[in-house]
Image (cartoon, coloured by chain):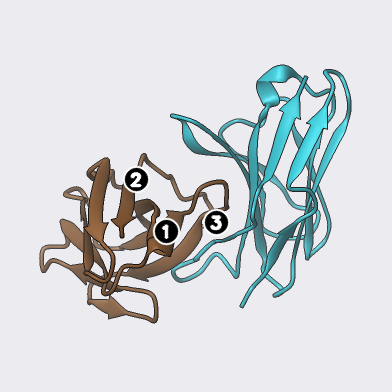
Chain colours: A cyan, B brown
Amino acid sequence: DVKVTQSSRYLVKRTGEKVFLECVQDMDHENMFWYRQDPGLGLRLIYFSYDVKMKEKGDIPEGYSVSREKKERFSLILESASTNQTSMYLCASSLSASGANVLTFGAGSRLTVL
Amino acid sequence: DAKTTQPPSMDCAEGRAANLPCNHSTISGNEYVYWYRQIHSQGPQYIIHGLKNNETNEMASLIITEDRKSSTLILPHATLRDTAVYYCIVRVGGSARQLTFGSGTQLTVLP
């Protein structure tokens, strides 16, 4: 089975800190995604990447950046964390853009910004 | 992507079949039906997907009506560990865009 591993399950940061959320997948998937999940708002796409060094903005990219230097790793960066970025962050990957394109999710990283 | 409608909550007795409905009346011919579930505080988990035909895997069965306007996810013998929010999603295959998760159905399996 594909495994998507997120580096931290729980993080607490202070306003203005730089935050790195790491995600690694082990099955050579081409596509990787970062979502945030908030009560009542469902999952919202922040960024996704369909290849190394390629990235595309999702629905809510403001305040975030991403990095994909290697195929298996997709990092989400909060340059200056703010309290409204307190959320559950979910990384996902999928094999390719063809066919059914099933997503495999990591366990999530719950970020609290004080 | 087509919009889906699911009941907000359902209960099921442990050991019985859980049948979760989903309406997707605006589905188009190249859109797949996907089911995911999310157990509290974990990432969503893929269950099953289908295009036109009914599908079965080790987790569940997916029944899609002939007109494709609705579907039912069946968990044949629900256990307490199946308590989760179940999401029905309809989208075109072959796209790297996100799946849009709605509110889903909170399934509670009762002992």
Amino acid on which the number 3 mark rests in the picture: Ala
Q: Is residue B75 left or right of residue B102?
A: left
The quadrant holding residue B18 is: bottom left
Q: Nearer the viewer, mark 3 or mark 2?
A: 2
- Callout 3 secondary element: loop
**Chain designation of label 1:** B
Which of the image's four quarters has the N terminus of chain A? bottom right
N-terminal-most mark, 3 or 2 = 3
**Which residue occupies the foreground of this view, B85 or A98?**
B85
Q: Is residue A23 left or right of residue B86?
A: right
Residue A15, disc: none
With respect to residue B36, does A78 lie above or below?
above
N-terminal-most mark, 1 or 2 = 1
- The residue where tag 3 is placed is B96
Give the residue displayed 63% in from the left and 38% down from the top. A88
Can residue A25 be seen from the camera position used here? yes
Q: Are marks 1 and 3 on the same chain?
A: yes
Pointers 3 and 2 in contact (C-beta within 8 Å) = no
- The residue where tag 2 is placed is B104
Give the residue displayed 60% in from the left and 30% down from the top. A60
Give the residue displayed 66% in from the left and 20% down from the top. A84
**Which residue occupies the foreground of this view, A63 or B7?**
B7
- The residue where tag 1 is placed is B36
Q: Position of residue B7 (x, y in %)?
A: 22, 43
Q: Position of residue A76 (x, y in %)?
A: 77, 42
N-terminal-most mark, 1 or 3 = 1
Q: Nearer the viewer, mark 1 or mark 3?
A: 1
Amino acid on which the number 2 mark rests in the picture: Gly
Pointers 1 and 2 in contact (C-beta within 8 Å) = no
**Chain designation of label 2:** B
Amino acid on which the number 1 mark rests in the picture: Tyr
Question: Spatial distance from mark 1 to mark 2, Cα to Cα?
Answer: 9 Å
